[in-house]
Image (cartoon, rainbow, N blue to C red):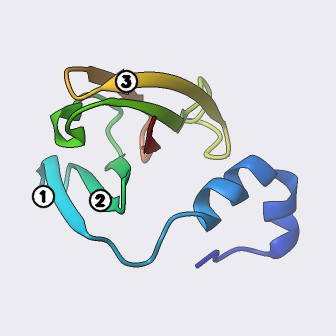
Amino acid sequence: MLSDNPSIYQREQESTNFIAAIPTTFDATVALDGKVGDFVSIARKKGRTWYAGAMTNWNARDLTVDLSFLGDGKYKAVIFEDGLNAGKDATDYTTKTITVTAKDKLTIKMASGGGWAARFDRE
């Protein structure tokens, strides 16, 4: 569900495409890390694709995401993360595409009230 005015989403088409492609049902769910009231990170699988996300309370934080849930093979990771000014402007984000394996760990920086999302497609 996209909960804002459609014209807002049209301004950020890459974000809209990313969000709209996330399935509504999953085959598996893995709780990665978290503390009630502070932060959470979770991964969900649909078919051969994994989706992961994290969010924090009003405390900015760094978090290490262990990718061992991925299993064998290489994955193309499309990542959306808080931009440099996300603590002051919640619409500030960056995106990148990298190749990862289950042996990798990603360090993510979340702004106050921020988050992180990734899609992992098996290559």
How far apart marks 2 and 1 lie (CA) works out to: 19 Å
Residue denoted by label 2: 44
Residue 24 location, quadrant: bottom left
Q: Please indicate whether residue 117 sits to the left or right of residue 2 in the image.
A: left
Callout 1: SS: loop
The kind of residue on which mark 3 rests is Val
Q: Whole-percent x and y of residue 102?
A: 22, 29
Callout 2: SS: strand
The kind of residue on which mark 1 rests is Val
How far apart marks 3 and 1 lie (CA) works out to: 29 Å
Q: Quadrant of the N terminus?
A: bottom right
Residue occupying the point 71% across, 74% down: 4
**Label located before the other in sequence (3 or 1):** 1
Number of the front mark, 3 or 1: 3
Residue occupying the point 58% across, 35% down: 86
Is 94 located above or below residue 24 in the figure?
above
Q: Nearer the viewer, residue 104 or 48?
A: 48
Q: Which mark is residue 36?
A: 1
Q: Whole-percent x and y of residue 90?
A: 61, 46
Number of the front mark, 2 or 1: 2
Residue occupying the point 88% across, 68% down: 7
Q: Please indicate whether residue 93 sits to the left or right of residue 112 in the image.
A: right
Residue 122 location, quadrant: top left
Residue denoted by label 3: 100
How many numbered dots are placed on residues in this image? 3
**Label located before the other in sequence (2 or 1):** 1
Residue 84 location, quadrant: top right
